[in-house]
Structure formats: structure tokens, C-alpha cells
Image (cartoon, coloured by chain):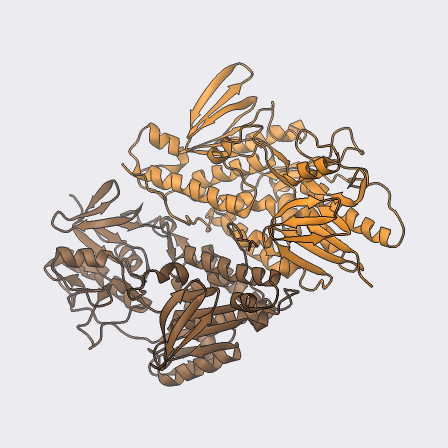
Chain colours: A brown, B orange
Amino acid sequence: MVLPRVVVIGGGFGGLQVVRGLRDAPVQVTLIDRRNHYLFQPLLYQVATGGLSPANISTPFRALVKKQRNTRVFLGEVQDIDMAGREVVLAGCRHPYDVLVVATGSQPNYFGHDQWMALAPTLKVAEDAISIRNRVLSAFEIAEREPAGPQRESLLTFVIIGGGATGVELAGALGELKGQTLRGNFRNIDPSTARVFLLEAADRILPTFPAGLSDRAVKELKRLDVTVCTQSLVTDIQPGVVTARVRDTSDVTMRAETILWTAGIKGSFLGQRIARSCQGEVDRNGRVVVDPDLTIPGHPEVFIVGDLACCRHQTDKPLPAVSPVAMQQGRYVAHLIQARLRGKSRPPFRYKDHGSMATIGRGAAVADLRKIQFDGWLGWLAWLFVHLLYILQFENKLLILIQWAWNYFTRNRSARLITGRFEEPCE
Amino acid sequence: MVLPRVVVIGGGFGGLQVVRGLRDAPVQVTLIDRRNHYLFQPLLYQVATGGLSPANISTPFRALVKKQRNTRVFLGEVQDIDMAGREVVLAGCRHPYDVLVVATGSQPNYFGHDQWMALAPTLKVAEDAISIRNRVLSAFEIAEREPAGPQRESLLTFVIIGGGATGVELAGALGELKGQTLRGNFRNIDPSTARVFLLEAADRILPTFPAGLSDRAVKELKRLDVTVCTQSLVTDIQPGVVTARVRDTSDVTMRAETILWTAGIKGSFLGQRIARSCQGEVDRNGRVVVDPDLTIPGHPEVFIVGDLACCRHQTDKPLPAVSPVAMQQGRYVAHLIQARLRGKSRPPFRYKDHGSMATIGRGAAVADLRKIQFDGWLGWLAWLFVHLLYILQFENKLLILIQWAWNYFTRNRSARLITGRFEEPCE
């Protein structure tokens, strides 16, 4: 008997749930990803600020599915999907499928200004985190060599664009880095004089959280000497210069050698390809509109889960692009595939919202668990617990816990490496 | 009162001992390094084989000398030394010195075949380890995609050139990786069929160890399915092909996609510059011949410590390029500088040889402590203890110990990331 072939593209929060959910199913599973490891993205900002090593938040896919004998891992970049021929197209090879799950997630959205990508990099994969770490640490190093003046000030100015959870967490970590971790490390500069700005176009940061928690987050960021600028829409980025329109009126220009982008995401490019070949619809963020069972119209054999899916049958707005949605969708699809094999069906997908959280440095976080809201210490403990719970592999849990404990007591961040060539300022 | 300026170039085993030894001295110390972190090189092979993260064996210099207020760290690459003007020359700036310590160590020696550098990379800095890890893991990934045949065999062949401690340890770790860590991870290939060759030109591996321990190391490597080829002098390297002359007679050619070089080192390029400007002597390995007090002839204000120093007043042969020599020399120079400040002098440098060790995978090592020799388990425990002792920072000791324990019990290596772009084979 030939087993149905299930191909899953993308091993993030959503895709991995599909793969793991099919471990005992009578199917052949192929997981295709362009990286060899699962990445726990919520902690990526800690890699970018020298608190953790990339390997601590990653697990090789092969280690994860080693004992799942119906599953193979294929490392490669999908270029297209031949929906008529039911094949996934890669450079030099094709993978036929009976059921396809597309879980390729999102990519940064520069809202039509793709030239900003190089000037204001984003934080999405391990390499981004390493590159931001190199940039941030190098900025302090070059500032130490620079005489006092506007160039040194610019080196010691960090602008984060986008006040969602990633922006808030990154800003908090940079605040800690400059105010605590690097204290006493330099002789010419005082790192605590570095300035961290968090720019948000909306009228409050963490706009998806209750307003009370946004206020609390602003207070916690202030404690870490981070300047929060709301109603500040970035209108231009040039090398080392950001321009923002404040309250729809005046334009403000800031010099900053380090500019980071966490202002928006859009569906990965495969979404456009899929929508085009099935006359489907993508929303304005490049997400593919899916049916209530997460398939695309006219193609019951193609599922989309996670950030790439625009799922709007349950609520007025599409479901948010967050990991709990992706994971629940992944589990739903794994169940639905198995139900279908038994000739059964399943009710439409329903997202159960347990809330969301964001941490703001040592001992502070905001957590919105819908019925109950935490902040400060209690929020931080809740954040810590939930994140450790979801980290895969006990070894990584332990390694992260030790580094957090160390950071907590000594304020040190041990993974402060500049790798690659340090770019020296030349006169 | 203007304090004497001591400039130390290079923060490896030797340079760091000088810096730390001067912590209470009435001098201004400047440590110049092109990297921002100290690296514990003896464990670099474990980073290259996915057992540890780079940060686990690194410590930022600034964290190390944070409380040493007479010391500043300068990140930059030294281009030359102006010995007449007593200045260190970097891109765009100069550092004047009263006392100079050059501890820039060694670089790989390809014995006149510099074109081999790109074909057979070496293991010297953190980036080398990451790049080797990417190469090795990618070779298995590409092999998994490849049909059976000579190309797949070549992908699954790893050749290490040079049977010194680094070569032996790297070969052992690759043996474990293919035979144990990756077991069950693939569906098309059996990683244990991969072949690991260790080529050594001399008639035994670990030539600086007693012959009995060399034999023991060969046995342990055999247990890990590593093929040791002694009296095999590499005469040519082409992309994916190594040619070796065996026993001065026949030429043997092997196809291997991964070729690594640990066959020799030579003094860093600053040695040549120094020797030229003071009419000094360099030996055939590019090491600068030093006086018994580790200064260079005619320049009592310039010290050379570590791999770059050719120190031959104590024994017939120059002292070996190993970390204990560098550390003892560093401590000696720190004491001598302080003695001179008090108008005193010190007897010539004397190296105290406590022995050497090399590990060969889980639970096996050879240790030559001069009076007593260990191998197997006891050697391994001695190796473990000594290495943990010399790792800086308690946090890193703990993180390494956990990962070793994990590796010991599960044979897993958790830092198996392929970072950067996975290079897909195209047809």
C-alpha cells in the first residue's frame, strides 16, 4: 500500500505541530525547510543582545524527528508550487504531494520601502540576531575610539522602529545592555549615556494589549532609560538618519548609526504564488485567505497555517500573526488530515486565545491572560515560566535558565561576541 | 606623574596573562586585539563539531578587565610597529608605548601552498569553527539528497591533515558525530558509513607525546572508525581531492568534499615586521628569536610571548607553541616589568613543563604528565578537569559541563546549526 504523501513547507511553530501531530498517522511526511533547525523566535531578541547563544534557542529538525520514522527532513528552498501537478518545486528537484501544508510564515514588511531593508535590518532568523549583535556591540567599540562629538553621539544612538512585542522586548534589552551590562566596561565613553528610542506610529505601544498594560510597559521602558515616541510614523530612512512624522504634523530627524526594524510583517512570497495559481485572495499584508478548515478555495488538499494564513471566519479581523495561532492551526490540520484518512471530517478551526505577554528587562513584563492581567514581577515570572515551557529539549531549558539566572544576579550577558570582521573606522 | 605605558598586542593565553599580571602595577595598560573576546582555543574543535556554542568558550575582554582600572581595551588590527618611534600603528591611529608586549600568536602554515587555504580551511578562531561546522553538517545534508555514487561518497568523506593534538581531537569528534550523534537522523544515507581520515606526515600521530600514547590514540581513533594514515605527506590539494605521498613512495589520491588543515602553524605576520626593523632573527616557522628575558636583541622594551616567540636558551629545540608556554611567559613578563619599575631584574625565563593531553571522544584521552602517563578513562577525567579549570568565568564552566554531561549520556550535540546560506546543489 502506498501511503499518502504529506509535504510540510516550513518548520516553524505551525509546521512543526503538523509534523509532530502526524507521528502515528499512516502517511509519509516530508518537512522541507531552508534551515536545518527549528528556531524559538520569541527569544531571538536575547540572542541579538548577547544574552543567549543561537544554539540555545534552536534545535536541529533531524534531532526532533529522529524517532518519527514516517518523517523525512529535506533541507532546501522552495521556489514554487505546481498546484495542478501537485508538486513542490525546488532548485534541481520536485516533491510530489497528496496533501500540502504551507507554513512558511512571514517576512518583514517595509511597506513599499524595500531600500530600507539594508539600512534598518530586522530580527527574524538566527543570522539577523547575530548581525544585530555585531552591529550593536561594534557601535560601542567604535564610539570608544571616537572623540566626543556628533559622530560619537550617533554611534551611541539606537532607534527601534515598531512598538509591538518584538520592538518593546528589544528596546528593553538594549536599555539593560547599555545601562547595566556594559557599565564600567569602557574608559572613554559612558555606555549609560547611549540613547535608545522606540518609535511607534500608533498612539500607544503594544497596541494589541489592553491600554493599561501599554502604559505599564512605557513606565518599565522609562526605568531602563528607553525613550518611547508614539504617533511617530517613519517617513524616511537614510544611512544613519531616521525621519519621522510626529502627530501628523512636524517632521523630526534623528542621527543614529543603529536603526532596527520591527514595524511590520507580511506573508512570505509563496503566498502570492499560491493565490495566483488558484485565483485565491491575499489580504493587504500578503496573507492568503483560507477557508474555515484552513484549506484554500478549490484545493482541499492544500492547507495554510500560521502567519501566512489570513483566517477571518471566526472574528471580524483576521487572526493575529502570533505563535499560539500557528501552533493551534498546526495541531488542527494534523487532526483533520487523520480524520479525512478515516473518512471523517472536523468542525471549522477555532482559535482559543489564552492571551499574550511581553517582557521588559529584568524582573518586569506585561501579561494579558484575558481574564486576568499581570505586570511587574508576577508578569515576569509568568513570562519566564511559559517561555521555558515551550522551549524544546530539556538541555536547552537548562542552559537558558542558567544564563538567565546569571544575568539576573550579575547583569552580565556572556554571549557578547563580535564575530566576522570587525569593521574598523578608517580616517 | 605620568605612568609608563604598556601596550599588549593580542589577548590570547600569553597576552592576557601579561594584562592580568599587571593589574596592581603602576602602569597604564592597553590591550589591543582585533576581536572583542578571549577565546579558549583548546575547545574550538567542539564548536566545529556542534558540541558547544562559540560563546561558551569565549569571554569579552571588557568583562575580563572591567575592574582593572589601569587597563583599557582597544579593538583594532595592528598593521605595523614603529620601533624607532615606539608606536603601534593601526588603521587611522597610533598607540605610543614605553613597553610593548607582542603576543599575536600564530597562523596556519601551508608550507608555501597558500592556495590550499581556501580548499582546506583551518581551525584557529571562532569563525573558522562556525564555518567548519556549516561545511560538515551541510555535507551530510547534501549527501542525503544525492543518489548513491561517487559524489555521495565524496560528500561523506572527511580528511583531516595533520595528526597533532588539534587534528586528533577533531578527528575523534567527527568520528563520534558520524557514528553516534547523527545516528538515525537521516533516511537515505547511513551517516556511520561516512569515512574520516587523519593524515600525518611523520611516522606516528601526536609526535610530541611518548610513543606509547600515540599507539593508544590510534586505538581509540580506530574505535571511533577513524582511519589513521601515518607517513602520508600531502603533496597536492585540489577542490575535493587530496593527494598524499605514502612512505616516500607511492602517491595516493582521495576524493573528499571536506578537507581540513591542522598540519602546522607559523608566527603571525608581525614577527617578520619586527625582525626586519631590528635586524632580528626569525626561525623557519616565522617565530622571532628572543633573548632569555623574552625581549628582542637591542630592544629591552619589546617583549614577545607565546607562539610568536622562538625561545631556545633553555633547551636544544625552541619551546613548543602550546598554551602553557604562552601563559608562563606572560606571567614572567608581567613580573619582569614590575621588577624593572622597582629597579630590579629577574633571572631568565624558565619553562616548567607539566605535560600535555589530548582527548579522543567520549571517555578517552591520552595525558602525558611527564612523571606519569594516563590514558582511557583516567586520562579523560584528567583532561576534563584541567580544561574546566582553565576556562574563564564560572558561568561558562557550568554551561560547558551541562553540555558535556548531555553529550555523554545522550550522544547528542545540541549546537548543530547551519548558519548563513545553505548552499544548495543545483543541477
- Which residue is drawn at the image coordinates 49% and 59% (left, top)? A135
Residue at image coords 55%, 33%: B220
Figure check: A312 above or below B38? below
Quadrant of image for the N terminus of chain A: top left
Q: Is residue B271 left or right of residue B197?
A: right
Closer to the camera, B320 or A282? Answer: A282
Task: Kindly tell me whether residue A361 is visible in this rendering.
Answer: no
Residue B185 appears in the rendering: yes
Looking at the image, the residue that sits furthest to the left is A298
Report the front residue among B210 and A285.
A285
The percent coordinates of residue B314 (x first, y second) are 80, 34
Answer with left or right where residue A85 lies relative to residue B361: left
Q: Looking at the image, which residue sits at the far top?
A: B249
Left-right relation of A28 to B128:
left
Name the residue at the front extreme. A427
Image location of residue B260, percent across then percent down: 50, 35
Q: Quadrant of residue B145?
A: top left
Q: Nearer the viewer, residue B181 or A184?
A: A184
Q: Which residue is painted at 28% across and 53% down in the image? A: A23
Residue shown at 70% from the left, 42% from the top: B306
Q: Position of residue B126 (x, y in %)?
A: 54, 47
- Residue at far bottom of view: A212
Question: Against A55, is A190 above or below?
Answer: below
In this view, B195 is above or below B393: above
Q: Position of residue A366 (x, y in %)?
A: 42, 78
Q: Count the marks: how many?
A: 0
Which image quarter is the C terminus of chain A in? bottom right
